[in-house]
Amino acid sequence: MMNRILMATCFAIVFIACKNEKKVEAIPENTAVDTSAAFNEMLDAYYEEGLQLNPVQATFAGDNRFNDQFPNPLADETIAKQKAYYTTYKEKLSQFEDANLSKSEQMTKAILQWECDMNLASFDHSKNYFPIDQMWSINLVAGQLASGASAQPFKTVEDYNNWLKRLDGYLSWMTSAETKMKAGMKEGYVLPKSLITKVLPQLNALTGEDLETHLFYSPVKNFPEDFSEEDKNQLTESYKKMVSEKVIPAYKKLHQFMSTEYMEAGRESSGVSEIPNGETFYKHQIKLYTTTNMTADEIHKLGLSEVARISGEMEKIKEEVGYKGDLKSFFDYVRNKKELMPFNEPQQVIDNFNAIHERMKPQIEKLFDVKPKTPFEVRRTEAFREKSASAEYNPGSLDGTRPGIFYTPIPDATKYNVYSDESLFLHEAIPGHHYQISLTQESEELPKFRKTLWYSGYGEGWALYSESLGKELGLYTDPYQYFGMLGAEMHRAIRLVVDTGLHSKGLTREQAIQYSLDNEAESEAGITSEIERYMANPGQALSYKIGQLKIRELRAKAEQELGDKFDIRKFHNEVLETGCVPLALLENKINTWIASNK
């Protein structure tokens, strides 16, 4: 996956290039204007107003002007401002005719139109009745910020005071969260009991009264060396008072509520189909995360088909290597096969990935004629987070001075299994996330906000599509490596079945867990966490496989309709040059490209 901070905010903001506090007025009729200049001015204003509406998002973006602010996203006033924001910019956007915009500006307009429409549509649903869950909610982001090791800076006295002010806003949100959940209980909007059970330890961990071990007291234990003793003493007293008199009581109160009356009201059902208007809500979630108009039934059938197809491919590999047991036992055989754990030192793992890269290089020119300039490196994941980390990609800097980095955890080189390394490199590194993200950042055509956009349907879809290029790139000559790719693909295919099953077909949590256990070799604990993840955020897990399959579908269509005129390098250029976009816009673009090349 591409490494990025999970932001659990109440609405999405598109990041636009420049900061400009000017308001954009309506364009008078019969007035000659520079359309591009007016369009860019509108983008600047959209960006600036968006930061003011969502100051926590601004902090994560590196804009520190609003670090003391935390407007309550559950408050009626905040919601009204959000609605007005998207409504206003949807109207402003309509002033710009496509005929007067360049192709790139037309795409930008379409993306902003998508953002306004999807965010306005979200207000029709009742997500605010579910302000807290075990994985995605604001309280988890607040914990990251409070630790002093995340986006909230703690370098100056002002920084420390900013966080105290922001905490007051966050504590107001905690009070509102309980109020919303109580209102939801009356209307039938409550979490499943199994998810409430997972939230309680998270809240309880912050009810302890030992300040020295409390997460929200962490900044006090890490004062910069240049702070005066007077400042340290004053801030220490302020943080003691804040944590002991406000933060801990707030967590105790919320924990008490959720562990008693909210738990008693919790649902036995697993999917959102059991809440009022759940079917409509799930349709919105599917569109939000897949960025397509697919239905739950279509996705479910697709998932079943993919699980069956991939199982058939796995059976072939099992037979090829001469294994006589069933498929489930073959998973365990592969994971424990000593010949697939050949290393003694961490550097050998790094060297293996570099060797995979070298094997690919002679073939890469056949598939890509535009390659990123941003440097690339493979590194071992840092020791402090290695035991719980997954392999991931960190993008290079926009100016190219920091390389793109593929991090791989190696807690014990002697137990490191190489069977999925080729597909992993294709996904996380080349031509997966490194090519897609670096080429976007290096583009001279895209406005800056589109260089940092992320739609997982596209981004993760491209990375999974990249795994399927292994044979074309001279890889997967070892059947175990190909089996590794199939295992990763199966995990995403199962998501299509169980997510839609949970939320549109009455599948229970237990049935979804069993289906996963029957079709992949992940541990029961890992699968349980996955299923509960899908329960907490319906539709999110659909984006990976849907994106991959859409890109495959578009390639097959181009190959069929263009015949001898099809050039795989040009196709990849068309997919990558737009940066991250909703899949519906990508499909329109590729269809136009196909038509223009017939």
Image (tube, rainbow, N blue to C red):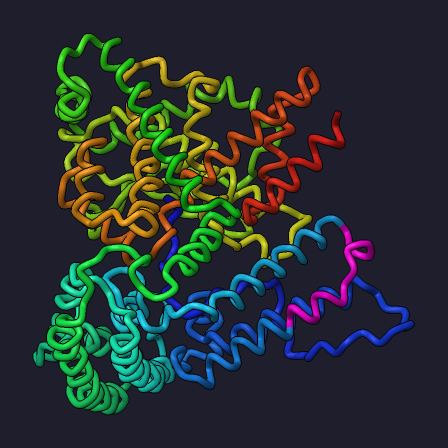
Q: Quadrant of residue 67?
A: bottom left
Taking the spot 14% from the left edge, 68% from the top edge, the residue there is 200
Q: Quadrant of residue 408?
A: top left
Observer-nearest residue: 284 or 11? 284
Observer-nearest residue: 434 or 349? 434
Q: Is residue 163 visible?
A: yes
Decide if residue 197 is on the left or right side of residue 169: left
Q: Is residue 407 visible?
A: no
Placement of the C terminus among the 4 image quadrants:
top right
Observer-nearest residue: 394 or 321? 321
| Residue 576 on the magenta span | no
Decide if residue 440 is on the left or right side of residue 478: right
Decide if residue 568 is on the left or right side of residue 132: right
Boundaries of the magenta span: 89-102
Residue 344 rendering spot, x and y as whole percentages:
15, 27
Q: Is residue 304 above or below residue 114?
A: above
Residue 178 rendering spot, x and y as whole percentages:
25, 80
The number of numbered badges drawn on the structure is 0
Taking the spot 28% from the left edge, 55% from the top edge, the residue there is 271
Residue 359 rendering spot, x and y as whole percentages:
42, 19
Taking the spot 70% from the left edge, 34% from the top edge, the residue there is 593
Observer-nearest residue: 220 or 315? 315
Residue 497 rendering spot, x and y as whole percentages:
32, 40
Decide if residue 579 is on the left or right side of residue 199: right
Placement of the N terminus among the 4 image quadrants:
top left
Taking the spot 31% from the left edge, 31% from the top edge, the residue there is 490
